[in-house]
Amino acid sequence: MYLISFYFFTALLGHKEAALRFQGHTPNCHLQESLLSSASGYSNYRGILNWCVIMLVSVSRCRRSPADGPGSRLSVRGVRMQPHTYVSSLYVCSVLSLSASNIFIMIALYTERRLSVGAIGENVGIIIHSINLSTVLFFPVATLLMVNSVTPVGGVLALAVYTILFLKLYSYKDVNKWCREIQHAKALSMSRSFSCPTVQRLNGAASRSQVHYPGNLTHRDMYYFVFAPTLCYELNFPRSPRIRKRFLLRRLFEMLFFMQLLVGLIQQWMVPTIQNSMKPFQDMDYSRMIERLLKLAVPNHFIWLIFFYWFFHSSLNFVAELMQFGDREFYRDWWNSETITYFWQNWNIPVHKWCLRHFYKPMLKRGMSKWVGQTAVFLISAFFHEYLVSVPLKMFRLWAFMGMMAQLPLAWLVGRVFQGNYGNAAVWISLIIGQPIAVLMYVHDYYVLHYGGEEPAAPVLLS
């Protein structure tokens, strides 16, 4: 059950030198299964034991007091779920995302086509891409701030889609630029520099023929990348030979089941717990604030784990199987993390690869130190965390930003003081306790801003 219970959202964002830059990233050109898939053969879950001990201790401390009220535990006295709020949120997100996003995708594609034939110069291309990428980030912000009918849930979904699109188009721009630089220098042949081996095999099946620049600048190639479960562009992605229908149906069932479970736990368990935590914050009763924080840590952490499994394993594997995308390394064994740094490098592999390839390594090649590069990666990750929270709530408190930046001294402390199982326990404790603090800060400020500190009768964050 614990394995089934495994959240999103953010550590982002000469000619010979250009070739080295392209070859220096972590390539996607290999076929592999996700660790939690039975076909992976992975069996090292020692970090789960530490998690079980910590959760047992946390649950034992969260005893019910007379002042808790009916919302302190999972509510069974009535159904609080409001499906129409999520239907409307998904509708707004889909309309905003699917309609307008095509404009930015086409601008990126046709700009690269013009650059490939020399119709416009590199400097002009940089200006067009910069304007396009900036608009990708600011267009949904302007829309959400002007349209009051969009709920926070719909706002988060829309901003998440545009954040993913921004990272994908940035990678698309970079890789095609590297292709042009090496093509012009004639330093390396296309088949060796920008493609996987001519034949890739999975269960004895050969892969498709390889694509070379500028033959990749097609609508089909662009939209395959836009929907593929990766943020790093390749001219030739690893492809699986067939769609496994049983695997696809299992992932689909998991997606539907865990989505309903997440919605139920949030509205039946977490929202009442948050509402009961508001009065201690208003009275500045520190002992009860700590007690409520520990009570919130349990449902928050379960929801985080379920979201992780739903998104990184079920949803991304479903999309990958449907698109015959071969690289299923969406996460590594972050549950065995003995340092904070290891956790951030392994729990969200698509974002980690993007940051490494398009942000961290280019900074090192410009002469920056590793510490400056790591700090810059946390800065951009902190920006996107705050972007995804503050804009939908229409208030700017920087709690998410400060929480991400606090990971730097925390990583140093855990790495220096704790080792082995103690380090793994320290990572788990930071995950269990850290997120509820940010949640309470935002919810408290939201209630104060919109309701003058009075508790609303309904879960307003979700409606």
Image (spheres, helix red, strand yellow):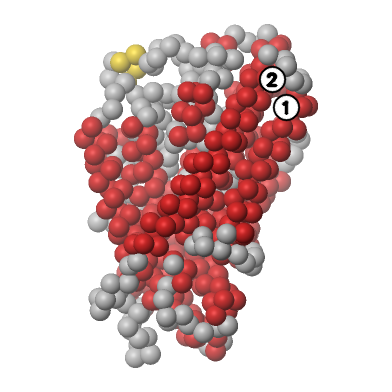
In this view, 157 is above or below 76: above
How packed mark 1 is, by other alpha carbons closer than 10 Å (few <14, some 14-19, many 20 or more), is some
Q: Are marks 2 and 1 in contact (CB under 8 Å)?
A: yes
Q: Given the image, on which type of amino acid does mark 2 rest?
A: Leu
Residue at the farthest left position: 246
Q: Which quadrant is the C terminus positioned in? A: bottom left
184 in relation to 358, above or below: above
Q: Secondary structure at mark 2?
A: helix
Give the residue drawn at x 62%, y 59%.
146
Q: CA distance from mark 2 to mark 1?
A: 7 Å
Q: Does any portion of residue 49 appear in the rendered image? A: no
Which quadrant does the N terminus fall into? bottom left
> In this rendering, does residue 322 appear at all?
yes
Name the element at disc 1: helix
Is 312 left, or right, of 351 in this rendering? left
The residue lying at 63 percent from left, 10 percent from top is: 188
Q: Which label number is shown at residue 125? A: 1
Which label sits on residue 115? 2
Can you give x and y, in whole percent of width and height, for residue 271 in the image? 40, 72
24 lies left or right of 224: right
Depicted 450 relative to depicted 227: above or below: below
The total number of labels drawn is: 2
What residue is rendered at 60% in x and 36% in y?
104
